[in-house]
Image: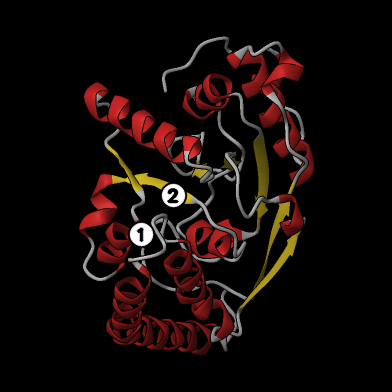
Amino acid sequence: MPTSDAPSISLGRRIYSASFWTFLVASCPVLFIGALAVFVVTAPFDRDRRVLHLYSCFWAQFYFYVNPLWRLRIAGRDKLPWRGPAVIVANHESLADILVLFGLYRPFKWVSKASVFKVPLVGWNMRLNGYVSLVRGDKARIRQMMDDCRAYLRRGVPVLLFPEGSRSDDGRVKAFKDGAFRLAVEEDCPVIPVALTGTARTLPKHGFVLRDAVDCRVRVLDAVYPKDHGHDVAELRDHVRALIVSARGDEPDSDEAAPPRARAA
């Protein structure tokens, strides 16, 4: 039997969630105008749009600042470069991963689904930032994504990818795809693993009701260099995945015991 106060808790959470989403929708136009102003002012001297990206970090983190249910802790931010090529990879639990990783406040280019770029205001800002779009399953678009990432790396701009490809359904780290690690091997640049925990409990995969108070944690791990793994894509991929799983405190799974040797980009 549910307790007598269960309906009131459910109603309160729904009201709070509705208020949060209303505030988010209402604030996005104002924040986008700010992004547009930053873009116009800095475009002549900021080719890589680093200033705009830092503004976008504030935009995303703003919703953590105003939401008392969400708390964020970041460790190891100083391991991320301000300049220089690097492939940043993180596990993927929730849409909230995007908001959380913007909290790194370091320059990088997102690799994101092309459909996200079509979202009004948020997607427009992603285009202003020059983030990289990806259409899963489209070989031509995947090649273009890889080319765009290579161009940024050669200009000394880090790129950030979710090597699982899509969000985890059960909170466990899924198998990693090769693409991010192939980039690191080809460009001979470090991979910087980032372990996320707690984000799966912030936003439901389906629906809009926010969950109970939650601590989100981001842990930036030490850089991993392709040369230390013989420039072998599969070995690098599996090593980085194992580091992230360990940093999250997950139990080893069958993928780690006998990881597949080849996966699509």
Q: Which mark is residue 110?
A: 2
Residue 250 drawn at (x, y percent): 75, 40
Lower sequence index among marks 1 and 2 = 2
Label 1 secondary element = helix
**In this rendering, is residue 258 above or below 67?**
above
Distance from disc 1 to disc 2, alpha carbons, whole Å, reads: 9 Å
Which residue is at 29% across, 74% downward? 40
Q: How is the image coloured?
A: secondary structure
Which residue is at 73% across, 37% downward? 223
The reply, left or right, for residue 82 in relation to residue 24 is right
Q: Residues within 10 Å of mark 2 (few under 14, many from 20)?
A: many
Residue type at mark 2 is Trp
Q: Which mark is residue 129?
A: 1
* Residue 104 sits in quarter: bottom right
Residue 90 drawn at (x, y percent): 59, 44
Residue 12 drawn at (x, y percent): 48, 89
Which residue is at 75% across, 28% downward? 252
Label 2 secondary element = strand
Q: Nearer the viewer, residue 207 or 92?
A: 92
* Residue 259 visible at all: no
